[in-house]
Image (cartoon, rainbow, N blue to C red):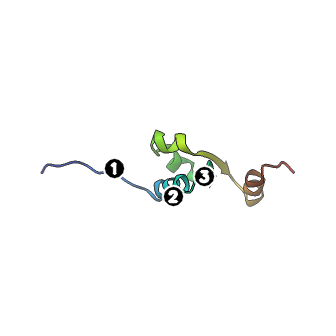
Amino acid sequence: MSGETMPVITMLDEIFVSAANAGAKKILLPENSRSNYEILSDKLKSEIAADFYSTPPEAAKLALGVDF
């Protein structure tokens, strides 16, 4: 067998590519997605910052950029 191998594309890859294409600068991810984030390519991680949240109120705070 010969040929090129194709990279494995995860759902998170697709989300990051879509967000980058839409012009997003930051994405919020649940804490349980951190391990999937760590395996993303450095190129994707450099294009969009990621913040992680554990609870819905924490996600709201991060999204709004406030601390209440």
**Dot label at residue 24:** 3
Residue drawn at x 25%, y 49% is: 5
Q: Where residue 14 sits: x, y (%)?
A: 47, 58
Q: Nearer the viewer, mark 1 or mark 3?
A: 3
Q: Amino acid at mark 3?
A: Ala
- Asked if the residue under mark 3 is in contact with the one under mark 1, i.e. CB atoms within 8 Å, the reply is no
Q: Secondary structure at mark 3?
A: loop
Q: Amino acid at mark 1?
A: Pro
Q: Secondary structure at mark 1?
A: loop
Q: Secondary structure at mark 2?
A: helix
Residue drawn at x 12%, y 51% is: 1
Q: Nearer the N terminus, badge 1 or badge 3? A: 1
Q: Where residue 17 sits: x, y (%)?
A: 49, 54
**Dot label at residue 7:** 1
Q: Nearer the viewer, mark 1 or mark 2?
A: 2
Q: Amino acid at mark 2?
A: Ser
| Image side of residue 35 versus residue 61, left or right | left
Q: CA distance from mark 3 to mark 2?
A: 9 Å
Q: Where residue 67 sits: x, y (%)?
A: 84, 48
Q: CA distance from mark 1 to mark 2?
A: 17 Å
Q: Where residue 59 sits: x, y (%)?
A: 72, 56
Give the residue number, with chain letter if any, for mark 2. 18
| Image side of residue 4 versus residue 11, left or right | left
Residue drawn at x 65%, y 47% is: 51
